[in-house]
Image (spheres, rainbow, N blue to C red):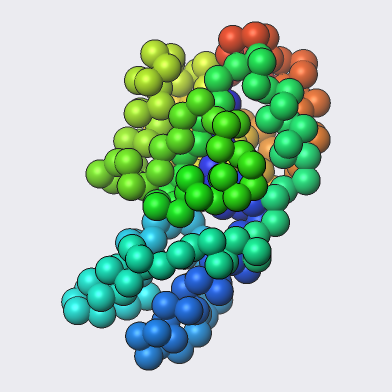
Amino acid sequence: MVVFDCDGVLFDSREANIRFYNHVMERFGRPPLRTDQVDYIHMHSARESLEYLLGSGPDLEAAWAYCQNLDFRIFNRYLRKEPGLDALLHYLKPRCRIALATNRTVSTRDLLASFHLDDAFDLVVTAADVARPKPHPESMEKILKAFRTVPHHVLFVGDSQVDALLAQETGVVFAAYKNPSLRAHIHVPSFAALQVILAGSLDAAHVTARRVLP
């Protein structure tokens, strides 16, 4: 089984995320994001990010309510699908289960539909589907339970420290995508490279740590 993160893995979403949060910050009379704030919002859920940016209190609740009614599709044009993603998903689909574990919330399914990926995943778990988002293990535990599988049969593809911590907490095999600084079982610079690795280690049912690790 292969599980993907969304932002930074399926999509280069940095510009879209910056534009979204700058839009919210401007709406509530706050300055544009600083570099350290950009790094945080790229990895965490919308609620966590808003609290980080605005603090607790009336502005947080007002911003959260505002975001619930915002059409996120206006920011989708700033997203770029990662090269090789379609080919990799096409390769995986008949061979194993595919899931998504993301700290996005209500925008996730519209985003997948916008890029014609809504049928690519057997299960999508967002921050709205769990009580505690990544790096808490709940999202991955939900996937493991749904498919009645064990951690060493799961390859998780992520790009951030949050993803690395999730893998560490749950015992799944971790592939660090375009981030050589992360502690991981394997590091992959592209989906084409990942497909080559999987071609040598994937059978029709699952990925095992024994077969994936070099």
Q: Quadrant of the N terminus?
A: top right
Residue located farthest toward the top when viewing the structure as drawn = 204
Q: Is residue 113 left or right of residue 171?
A: right
Residue located 60% across and 31% down the image = 120
Q: Is residue 113 above or below residue 145?
A: below
Q: Is residue 22 above or below residue 189?
A: below
Q: Position of residue 20 (x, y in %)?
A: 50, 71
Residue located 35% across and 66% down the image = 69
Q: Is residue 209 left or right of residue 203?
A: left
Residue located farthest toward the left when viewing the structure as drawn = 57
Q: Is residue 187 above or below residue 141?
A: below
Residue located 40% across and 32% down the image = 140
Is any atom of residue 156 visible in this view?
no
Residue located 54% across and 61% down the image = 73
Q: How many marks?
A: 0
- Is 172 or 105 nearer to us in this picture? 105
Residue 3 found in image quarter: top right
- Is 2 or 201 nearer to us in this picture? 2
Q: Is residue 26 above or below residue 141?
A: below
Q: Position of residue 107 (x, y in %)?
A: 45, 54
Residue 177 found in image quarter: top right
Is any atom of residue 178 visible in this view?
yes
Q: Position of residue 25 (x, y in %)?
A: 42, 81
Q: Is residue 71 left or right of residue 86?
A: left
- Is 128 or 31 nearer to us in this picture? 128
Q: Position of residue 178 (x, y in %)?
A: 70, 48
Q: Quadrant of the C terminus?
A: top right
